[in-house]
Image: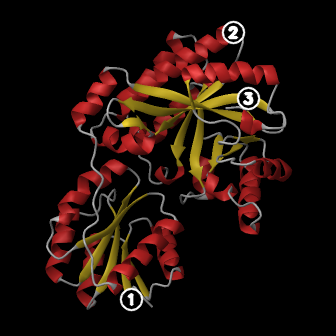
Amino acid sequence: MFPDCVVVIEHHAFQRAVLVKALSNLGVGRVLSASDAEQAIGLLKELPKVDIVFFDLADGSINHSAFLKVASEMGNVQTLVAYSELQADLYRAVRPMKTLSGLKLLGILDKPLNMQDLQRLVANFRHRHQVQSMPDLSVPELIPEEEVRHGLAMGAFEAWYQPKFDLVERRLFGVEALVRWSHPTRGMLLPRDLLGAVLAYDLIDEMLKQLLDQGIALLMRLRAQGLDLGMAFNLTASQLVRNELVEHIIQRLQEHDLPGSALMFEVAESSLLDLPASALANLVRLRESGCGLSIDDFGLGFSSLRLLAQLPFNQIKLDGVFVQDLADPGHRAVVASSLALTRALHMDLIIEGVGSQLTLDTLIELGCNFGQGFHLAMPMSGTDFCYWLERYQNRQGLGGGPGTLK
């Protein structure tokens, strides 16, 4: 089997076990694991050759420079795969790795890891081994800090809104605010294009505050017209530890006499493990203020039932990957089990990625009540959303062709 030997360094036992199992299923000959750098170095000393070393850049127990220096000196590590929840961690840490003699970077991955990315990396290793060539992979360049700061200062970061629907009642009940940046030379930038830079320069709070102000202004206009919609924003785990940001959110609600229930904050499932006490306290503060809390990208992380029961979330968003092929019994089982879980925990389940009428019909048949996706409505600028909303109200719901409501 090839690769012949892979070492996984991951301090979280369950995530480590899942990654080991996934690599084994992909045909890796031997998969060894370590909980920390010291244990990994012990393994490396006993192995004549290691094809790939996987490690988490966000793992504070690993001194990356020291570990990679030792691994380089041993000379038996062929390639590295680095992964992290935050793109900024990857950008900051990958460049020094590429300067370490004898070590080659096979790839960098965002958490949560998925089988498709792992399969791609393993296939890439096999191909490069066959052609006896392993050039370093280029690391995407960050947008320069001065450009990001200028864009924020000019108010160029814009909230776009994707509607969310009650699928059964065919009713719009809220929107998710998503960032867009119409860059003067780079064109329209999506979250995947700009978040790495925003995180790297620690400007994520400033960006959220601007999106929050835009979103609240829209909510107030709609309320003046008698429309009571909710709005969701994305939060990172790093933001949850900042008391000032939570104070800002609560203050904005009070200034506009807006109930906390008007806002929902979505946090990726993969970031919920090992949350510090300060982050948990701020989650509670947001819930006590009436704000909703949603576990985003559910199904791609490693949450335990105990964790879900303990955290103050009231909504789960099932990742769209599970509804792309609902003819697959496994995918249908994931949806059904997620429904049962949320009902048992007295939470709402929202399905992401509703991309076709067939998917919509199947989800309703399975008992799903809430969803969003391109088939229902695309993300829109504030102006376009208001035009869309007027047309939606005239149509009185989803009707027979939600794909036309764009």
In this rendering, the answer to whether 303 lies above or below 150 is below
- The answer to whether residue 109 is left or right of residue 332 is left
Residue 34 visible to an observer of this rendering: no
In the drawing, what numbered circle is on residue 147?
none
Query: Which x, y percent locates residue 97?
Result: 21, 64
Residue 388 visible to an observer of this rendering: yes
Discs 3, 1 touching: Cβ within 8 Å = no
Query: Toward the viewer: 206 or 375?
Result: 375
- The answer to whether residue 357 is left or right of residue 5 is right
Query: Which x, y percent locates residue 141?
Result: 27, 49
**Quarter residue 74 falls in:** bottom left
Q: Is mark 1 on a helix, strand or loop?
A: loop
Query: Which x, y percent locates residue 401?
Result: 80, 38
Task: Looking at the image, tell me whether mark 2 or mark 3 is earlier in sequence order.
Answer: 3
Mark 2 neighbour density, 10 Å: few (under 14) some (14–19) many (20 or more): few
Discs 2, 3 touching: Cβ within 8 Å = no
Q: What element carries label 3?
A: strand
Kind of residue indicated by mark 2: Gln
Residue occupying the point 72% across, 67% down: 330
Kind of residue indicated by mark 3: Leu
Q: Mark 3 points at which residue?
A: 172
**Quarter residue 209 falls in:** top left
Query: Which x, y percent locates residue 345?
Result: 71, 47
Task: Looking at the image, tell me whether mark 3 or mark 1 is earlier in sequence order.
Answer: 1
Q: Mark 1 points at which residue?
A: 4
Q: Is mark 2 on a helix, strand or loop?
A: loop
In this rendering, the answer to whether 398 lies above or below 125 is above
Q: Distance between the residues labelled 3 and 1?
A: 53 Å
Residue occupying the point 53% across, 58% down: 301
Q: Distance between the residues labelled 2 and 1?
A: 65 Å
Quadrant containing the C terminus in the rendered view: top right
Mark 3 neighbour density, 10 Å: few (under 14) some (14–19) many (20 or more): many
